[in-house]
Amino acid sequence: MGSTPSVAVRPRREPHRLAIGYLGNPAECYYPVKLKPGLRPGTGMDMVKRLEALEDRVHHYETRLADQEARLTQVALQSQPMPVQTPGLSLPAGLSSTLSDLPSAGLPDLVGPPSGGPIDLSSFGPSASPGNLSTTSFRDPQVLPPDDVVRDLIALFFTHIHPWAPILAPSLPSWSPPWSIVVHAIVVVTLRISTDPRVVASREQYKAAAKQHVVAHAIESTSISSVQALALLALDLIGSEQGPSSWGILALLTRSAVHLGLAVEEDASSFAAMVGRAPAPSLSRTSIIPPAANWHEDESRRRLFWLIFCLDRYACVSTGWDFALPDFDIKRRLPCADDLWARNEWFFAPSFKPVLHRDLVPDHSVLSPMAYLVEALDLLGRAHTLQSQIIEPGDARAVEIRKDVTMTLTSAAKRWYSDLPIREGHQSAISLMIQGIHHATLLKLNAYYAFPALSNGEPQEPYVSTCLTSARSMVALTSVARDAGWQRTSTPLFIWSCWVSARVLFVHAFLAHQLSPDEDFDSIVAALKEQAQYWGLAKQYVRLLERAKRKWLASLGDASDKNLPDAIHVLLDLRRTAYSAVKTNQQETPHVSPPDVNLSHLPAWAVQPLLGDLHNWFDLPAGLFQADTGGSSRPTRRTGGAGTEGAAYHREGGAEKL
């Protein structure tokens, strides 16, 4: 008999070893102990080293903070007590030189510290005062240009920007460092017009640092001065190449106006004295800011609110958004004349009342030109409200009501414009801006019916004549502004009005089968080019208008190509918003024009609503072509609740809703 093969049995006390032998292969197998996931050789030592480095860095920060706290304590002991400030006043001059000696308070660290480097905390100092009139809730981080350059920028601001955004009191204190938060905002909005060689090379760095400081201050403490600074930043934003995606400051600004109660007059006791009785008691509203200390401050708050109102109306009209400041919440007097503001006596200007709803024309001698800007943008906002409402194609009554309200608004705007006292004599930036907004309002209203050619309709009078008259009036205004100097007269709202007029002139020439846009179109485009050196908004409009003209002329030489280039289609397609055409406009792909539809068998009232989206082709704020500069774009949304408002509009009788 053969021998039986031997088998090795696994020992009980050595679970990691197993020896098995079969026939001629008696080998021993070894199974190492399984390690936990992640515990690889060297991992623990690496974590220990990183933890030690982190502890060293924390200790370094503690040392720096303790040193800075000691310095600030010493400064506080040496400085005099700070009196109650007005928005223009600043901290004691001795504080600036001491803070400038603090480590890491320079511009490069604030603009953007290097990766892994120390974080500059010097701009986040203790609040100067819990009071709501503080101008420097954060300590001055020395992010501005040299003091003499800042003074030059302040002078430029009051020469070129303050005349069309007059929100700072006329009795100005002496501007001196440490610079208030308002001065930081002045630097942001004024750097664009400075030609000082000391700031030209570092303009964007100074601007970014000062803007960051203002926003941080406004978030940390809500005050009149911080809202004034935000309003100036908003002027810079709407005039820049950044689009509505970066307009968060406008949301913060409008909410701050409501938060501080700026939409309602503060002097209830004064009104009670005028009517001879006290107001009825109501719910006590929490007050964030104390009453105005003097007349200058009271009027300054009023003008601040009206500037926010104007910015809100412009932003909503140019994007299709809803108003953040509804008309029914506003109970404010209009801005008074500058000479009355400069006095020390309180003055009660007429209360704001919409042009459509007032019976008497207010006394122009007591009003600031800013009051007319408010009324012009109120009319533009009402045109926006009308065209945001959706009507059904089969609702003949709704179509006729909209047409009647359009004529009512047009007539009211023309009557208001004829009574303006600012159209004669010297033309300032604010007077040109008011007239530009008026013409843009007429274009927005009447182009709805003036250019129905894409839906096989016929142009209607007097809408066509009204549009052409307003567009050519804008051409004349650009000549006046050019003669006065673009540095003084160019503003974001005037640029937007130029854009609206240029687009209407292009559409009229194209639909009239002309061979090219006329000289008026070229004149407005040239004016936009000249303004582009001050406001990036103009560059966006020039880019689209010139591209559309170039594609038009190229299409004339190629009769075989029946496709309509997208650059032209963006201007002509009345059913497409400008935002929805951004991506296709960036792509050099031709757009096939839809075939003509025979609508002759339908009544006129059924054809007209096909132009329901016409108002959207004015909605082209800055940033439409962010893809050209590496940004991104997205389609805009339609105004929320338009359907519900439209139903209410029909029930309430059209014009009364507006």
Image: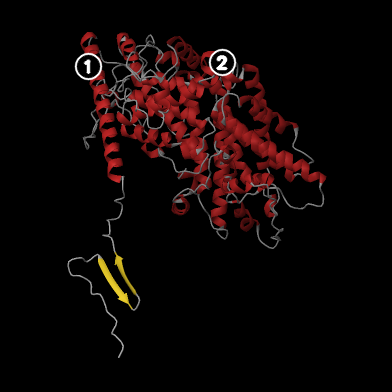
Vertical comparison of 609 with 338: above or below: below
Residue type pointed to by label 1:
Ala
Q: Is residue 207 left or right of residue 269?
A: right
Image location (x, y in percent) of residue 656: 46, 44
Residue 282: mark in rendering: none
Q: Secondary structure at mark 1?
A: helix
Image location (x, y in percent) of residue 89: 34, 14
Residue placed under numbered mark 2 in the picture? 195
**Residue 183 can be seen, yes or no:** yes
Number of the front mark, 1 or 2: 1
Q: Is residue 386 left or right of residue 480?
A: left
**Residue that appears at 31% across and 13% down:** 91
Model colouring = secondary structure
Residue 70: mark in rendering: 1
Q: How many marks?
A: 2
**Residue 126 can be seen, yes or no:** no
Occupied quadrant, residue 393: bottom right
Q: Secondary structure at mark 2?
A: loop
The reply to whether the C-beta atoms of the residues labelled 1 and 2 are less than 8 Å apart is no
